[in-house]
Image: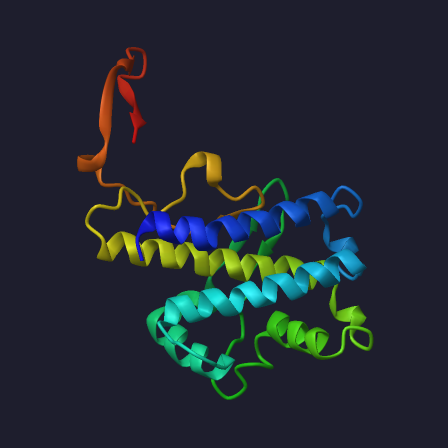
Amino acid sequence: MTFDEYRINYWRMFLLLEKELVEALDYVELNTNNYATTSIVFSKLLLSIGAEIDNVFRECSGLSGRSSIEHYYNFIINKYPAIVNQQVKVKDTTIVLKPYDGWNGSQPAQSLIFWQKYNELKHDRVLNAQNASLETVLNALASLFVMELYRFDDIYRTHGDTFTNMPNDELESKLFVLNAWDIKMRTSKVKLDYSLYDEESGTYDFQL
């Protein structure tokens, strides 16, 4: 899958889910004091985010057909062993998330907390309505964000015609930044517009 194909088929869905959460945050302020807040909007979001994580896990794993979290775990933890320590900074806050913290092979479904809560909600939306909290939704979306960027990096490393391992500025996440993320660019793929040369800084504005 090319960079643009992944961006169109997967990253756009992340941005849509993020947009829905940002809109919900107009009514529930994003801070840890509100982590336990639940709503039907959060319930809808958690179900949608969980389903998309399943899709991205499958895409990253190269698996087809019906797959379980156990199958995903074995592939992902071997390919991305640092994922359990990966930190996600929430923009304009002091919140730092580790959505894969504690994920282990002995209990791959239960140890991935947001995934367990998503599954419980999926199987009984009424009984497990309390699972749809701001904290769980935020961690679930952050986990999707991590996998999206890891996949972009995979594509960058395997496709020589890919310019960068990041979505462009117009399509970047409004909520998250990945800590210690190595942004890569192939300058050979950059077109320089000499009319955009900034004499003061001595640099060009890159144009794709």
In this view, the residue in front, 99 or 56, is: 56
Image spot of residue 194 (x, y percent): 23, 15
Q: 2 left or right of 95?
A: left
What colour scheme governs how the chains and residues are painted in the rendered image of this protein? rainbow
Image spot of residue 22 (x, y percent): 67, 45
Residue at 72% in and 48% down:
30
The C terminus is located in which quarter?
top left
Q: 168 left or right of 50?
A: left
User: Above or below — where is 200 with respect to 160?
Assistant: above
Residue at 41% in and 54% down:
149
Residue 37 seen anywhere in this rendered image of the structure? no
Image spot of residue 175 (x, y percent): 58, 45
Q: Residue furthest front?
A: 65
Residue 171 seen anywhere in this rendered image of the structure? yes
Residue at 66% in and 66% down:
47
Q: 26 left or right of 83?
A: right
The N terminus is located in which quarter?
bottom left
How many discs appear? 0
Q: Residue furthest bottom?
A: 106
In this view, the residue in front, 63 or 75, is: 63
Image spot of residue 166 (x, y percent): 38, 45
User: Above or below — where is 16 with respect to 57?
Assistant: above
User: Above or below — where is 99 with respect to 190?
Assistant: below
